[in-house]
Amino acid sequence: QVQLVESGGGLVPAGESLRLSCAVSGRVFSVNAMGWYRQAPGKQRELVAAIASGGSTSYADSVKGRFTISRDTTKNTVYLQMNSLKSEDTAVYYCNAEGVTGYGLDFKYWGQGTQVTVSS
């Protein structure tokens, strides 16, 4: 079974930084696209950043220049470096990964979510 385990959330003052991590474990043949989403109270889940298997990245306009997504393919882990955090970045952040299991089946899973709270 494939699992995504997130870590790195917390409470920080505005202007500070946090780094989120998400590791994919289980019987995995390959991990392709990975991404970070967030959901604030009363709002829909939105894409924050994504990274393809080849390394190309995309970002929501609201985080461009402040957040950086990266991945370690040897560890099937994706990171989100968040700098210059703002109160509007407060949300539950979810990791998402798509790939192929060791049984040859496509998968798309979500992490359990990690709370990021930015105090103003």
Image (tube, rainbow, N blue to C red):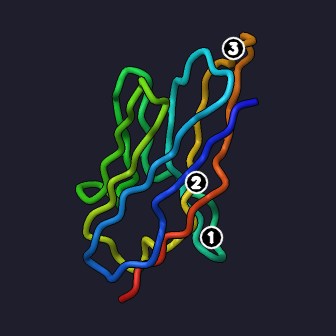
Q: Which residue is mark 2?
A: 94
Q: Position of residue 31 (x, y in %)?
A: 54, 24
Q: Is residue 39 left or right of residue 63?
A: right
Q: Quadrant of residue 26?
A: top right
User: For the residue labelled by badge 3, is the local secondary structure a helix, a strand or a loop?
Assistant: loop
Q: Residue at x 57, y 66 (%)?
A: 92
Q: Mark 2, mark 1: which one is toward the viewer? A: 2
Please name the amino acid that badge 1 sits on. Answer: Lys
Q: Position of residue 104 (x, y in %)?
A: 72, 10
Compare marks 2 and 3 and give the one earlier in the sequence. 2
Q: Which residue is mark 3?
A: 102
Compare marks 2 and 1 and give the one earlier in the sequence. 1
Q: Is residue 100 left or right of residue 12?
A: right
Q: Residue at x 74, y 16 (%)?
A: 105
Q: Mark 1, mark 3: which one is toward the viewer? A: 3
Give the spatial CA distance, label 1 vs label 3.
36 Å
Give the spatial CA distance, label 2 vs label 1.
14 Å
Q: Which residue is mark 1?
A: 43
Please name the amino acid that badge 2 sits on. Answer: Tyr
